[in-house]
Image (cartoon, rainbow, N blue to C red):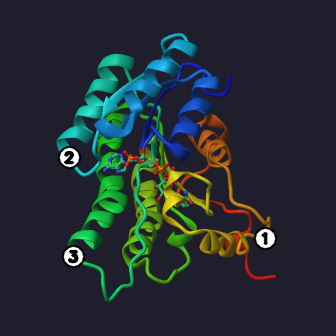
């Protein structure tokens, strides 16, 4: 059991990569809080998983764009579990619109969830972990944190910001025993991709040398590694889990 007795928060934990990460952490012995929007179905998923895993799964409604909700998430978790050992800063949304057509509202919303939200959660995590003298924060970036892509200016700006913010937070938190890393997923088969049409999807698959989309469990396994003591000398890293996407062209 690689996470026995650990207390873990997963934002965006009701769906896709987040849900797979919740399930892997539960299998490895952790107590896990699914933090997601009220309407995400997270409460029902947490109740079902709680039944399967001896009362170790909780739900806390949390919109990462609201500082008070993020701070309450950490207060409630400490009240319930006593501490926070690992956080997967995973909540995020997509967005594909020609840049000359993007409205302020859309651009700012993507930045507010995918970049500002990651900072709000990391800040609240540090307020618990620095006094503890231990903890692991894992930020979900993307291949689009290190690569550009047409019609995704807000998304790529946010994910690029997450990659470099991770390095700054890692340096700042390291002297107090807290590690901060990022994961850079390639295209992963989750509800986030539902908006893409079939031709676009086939084109994207072709960009991964391994010749397929990734699976949520494959990102969950990377989170598990970075969250656990197995990664005790890893901080400030951006671990690409992308089927070779960023390795180069064949
Ligand atoms: P999903 O849409 O399956 O899951 C995202 C979850 O985040 C959903 O439960 C969603 O709730 C929740 N969420 C959205 N907005 C907020 C918010 N403001 N506060 C709290 N929770 C919120 O997507 P994925 O699992 O694919 O994505 C997870 C992460 O992985 C994201 O950061 C994404 O950018 C990143 N990623 C995904 C890739 C992919 O190909 N799938 C590739 C690279 C990175 P609801 O469903 O109710 O909106």
x and y percent of residue 227 in the render? 56, 39
Decide if residue 243 is in sight here.
yes
User: For disc 3, does the CB lie below 8 Å from ligand 1?
Assistant: no
Whether residue 80 is situated above or below residue 196 in the rendered picture: above
Residue at numbered disc 1? 209
Whether residue 86 is situated above or below residue 212 in the rendered picture: above
- 3D distance between C-alphas at marks 3 and 1: 36 Å
User: For disc 1, does the CB lie below 8 Å from ligand 1?
Assistant: no
Q: On the image, which quarter does residue 71 sit in?
A: top left
Q: Mark 2 Cα within 10 Å, few/some/many (few <14, many 20+)?
A: some
Quick one: 27 or 196, which is closer to the camera? 196
Q: On the image, which quarter does residue 43 sit in?
A: top left
Q: Mark 3 Cα within 10 Å, few/some/many (few <14, many 20+)?
A: few
Quadrant in the picture for the N terminus: top right
- 3D distance between C-alphas at marks 1 and 2: 40 Å
The mark that comes first in sequence, 2 or 3, is: 2
Camera-near label (2 vs 3) is 3
Whether residue 197 is situated above or below residue 30 in the rendered picture: below
The kind of secondary structure element at disc 3 is: helix
Quick one: 93 or 157, which is closer to the camera? 93
Q: Which residue is rendered at x = 37% and y = 39% of the image?
A: 40
x and y percent of residue 126 in the render? 34, 43
Whether residue 164 is situated above or below residue 30 in the rendered picture: below
Q: Is residue 171 left or right of residue 20?
A: left
Name the disc covering residue 104, or none. Answer: 3
Q: Which residue is rendered at x = 44% and y = 73% of the image?
A: 156
Q: Which residue is rendered at x = 31% and y = 54% of the image?
A: 117
Decide if residue 237 is in sight here.
no
Residue at numbered disc 2? 67
The kind of secondary structure element at disc 1 is: loop
Quadrant in the picture for the C terminus: bottom right
x and y percent of residue 113 in the render? 32, 57
């Amino acid at each position: 059991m690689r996470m026995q007795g650990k207390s873990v928060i997963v934002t965006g934990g009701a769906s896709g990569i987040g849900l797979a990460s919740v399930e892997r952490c539960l299998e490895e012995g952790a107590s896990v809080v699914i933090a997601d929007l009220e309407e995400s179905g997270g409460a029902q998923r947490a109740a079902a998983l709680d039944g399967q895993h001896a009362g170790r799964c909780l739900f806390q409604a949390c919109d990462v764009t609201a500082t008070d909700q993020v701070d309450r998430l950490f207060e409630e978790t400490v009240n319930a579990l006593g501490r926070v050992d690992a956080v997967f800063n995973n909540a995020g949304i997509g967005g594909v619109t020609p840049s000359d057509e993007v409205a302020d509202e859309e651009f700012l919303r993507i930045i507010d969830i995918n970049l500002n939200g990651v900072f709000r959660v990391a800040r609240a995590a540090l307020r618990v972990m620095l006094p503890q003298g231990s903890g692991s924060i894992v930020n979900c970036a993307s291949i689009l944190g290190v690569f550009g892509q047409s019609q995704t200016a807000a998304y790529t700006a946010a994910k690029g910001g997450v990659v470099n913010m991770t390095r700054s937070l890692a340096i700042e938190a390291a002297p107090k025993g807290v590690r901060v890393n990022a994961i850079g997923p390639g295209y992963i088969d989750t509800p986030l991709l539902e908006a893409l049409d079939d031709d676009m999807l086939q084109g994207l698959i072709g960009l991964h040398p391994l010749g397929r989309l990734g699976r949520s469990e494959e990102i969950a396994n990377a989170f598990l590694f970075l969250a656990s003591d197995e990664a005790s000398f890893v901080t400030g890293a951006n671990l690409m889990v992308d089927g070779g996407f960023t390795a180069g062209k064949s």
